[in-house]
Amino acid sequence: MTTAPTSGPRPHVQDDPHTPDSHEVDVVVLGVGSGGERLAHRLREGGLEVAVVESGLVGGECPFHGCTPSKLLIRSADVLAEARRVEGLAGSVRLEPSLAPAAARIREANHDWDDEAHAGPLVEAGALLVRGHGRLDGPGRVQVATEAGTVLLVARRGVVLDTGTDPAVPPVEGLAGTPFWTNREAAALTEAPRSLAVLGGGPIGTELAQALARFGTRVTLVEDGERLLGPEEPEAAALVTDVLREEGVDVRTSTTLARVAHAHGRFDLTLEGPAGAEDLEVERLLVATGRAPRLRRIGLATVGLDPDADVVDTDERCRAGERLWAIGDVTGKGAFTSVALYQADVVARDLLDTGTDREETGPEAWADYRAVARVTFTDPEVGAVGLTEAQAREHGLDVAVGLADVGRAPRGWMHGARGLVKVVADRRAGVLVGATTVAPYGGEVIGLLSTAVHARVPVRTLRRMHLAYPTFHGTIGVALDKLAEQGV
């Protein structure tokens, strides 16, 4: 296994001793993840002078350690699973799993952890790229510690925070100092370990547990909550758990990792679960217990914000304070690349003063998080949008629920698929406020329901739609009919 580098070649480093110590621009983007990168391009296209500050890889977590590498690994694992389904459908096949092709595709996709494909176009577009650790120094001011010294950036219009997150590491006895993995090390895998414990049953943990199990790794998945995928619908979590167990993953819920020791290339873990304490020995340990925002060392106090905050509060224009905006994971609106890109467009409209154009008047010009779509890329995929049933009830809504079995639908039966569609409606308003799809390509199936939640399409209108046959999304019609039985 090769450890993924945290930074690549730096062809545009602004640390030449002859570089002026200060620069005045229109906007400073502090942190260049997917959202910051998109925003910088939008602002340059709009004619603003922009400086971007990044201490790691320009482009952020998604292309180098998150979305892209994990989905390439998952795609390869899914092919293995599909090949194992040949018997009974199309004959027989002999498998020899190898992670090498997936590893090669990952390195090709992210250019061996070289960010030139992201940094180069920004510089070519006219953005000033300053490499180093940046921190706020009052409204409209950012100080950057570069290899050659401190650079001061002064923003005439303001600063946009896009500092992102790091893998969160829990305070488990003995864990610090051991060679455990996070998603970053997993992104650089070249071969599957013989055995692996995954700590954390959220999207990252469940996705990687299933993928590596399909490559032949003996996987134990440890979750301290009562179920996997805690924020999602319980029906979805139960189905995914069943599938993982059938594929050989040892799923332990309501179980905590109490102690860790590492010696002679092995991890010795002490688990505490419903049956008491138990020792587990594995070759590798993957920690997937969430994300920690990078907010502690960026000078929030200098702009009147709480330096110990877990998120930066923003309004509908993503404004966080005087001449200050924030986008991405640090806003707490959803740790998804799609949210960061969406917020980047909102901030661009605000800074370029185009949010009040004739075609973009009213609240739709600004941020609306009612219909945030999300996908967990297990097999089957879990797509979701808006509120779960429990969240809708917590909001005080008069809730109606429709649930349909994908496996009983014609397309599901043909594929031997397992899954479900669950729709959550506001009975009084007659609209959907949330939905979940568990199915092959469930992240694609959720698209129709995302539109329905976002646009508040009446349920009666949805029921009168023509849904292609036979399709996975056709199961949505069955779930909607269940709402009719409840007067929606």
Image (cartoon, rainbow, N blue to C red):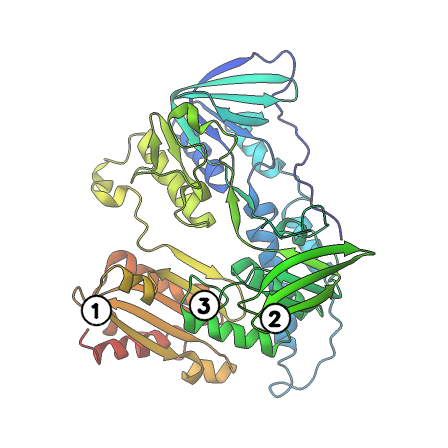
- Which tag, 3 or 2, sits closer to the chain's start? 2
The residue nearer to you, when weighing 92 against 273, is 273
Label 3, on which residue? Answer: 442
The residue depicted at 75 percent of the width and 61 percent of the height is 283
Residue 458 position (above or below residue 93): above
The residue nearer to you, when weighing 359 against 274, is 274
- Which tag, 3 or 1, sits closer to the chain's start? 3
Label 1, on which residue? Answer: 461
User: Which residue type does callout 1 highlight?
Assistant: Thr
Which mark's residue is nearer the viewer, 1 or 2? 2
- Other-residue count near label 3 (Cα within 10 Å), few / some / many at <14 / 14–19 / ≥20: many
User: Which residue type does callout 3 highlight?
Assistant: Gly
Label 2, on which residue? Answer: 276
Which mark's residue is nearer the viewer, 3 or 1? 3
User: Which residue type does callout 2 highlight?
Assistant: Gly
**Quick check: 390 left or right of 38?**
left
Question: Circle 2 — which element?
Answer: strand
Q: Position of residue 357 (x, y in %)?
A: 24, 36
Q: Position of residue 62 (x, y in %)?
A: 55, 47
C-alpha gap between disc 3 and disc 2: 37 Å
The part of the image, by quadrant, that contains residue 9 is top right
Residue lying farthest bottom?
A: 88
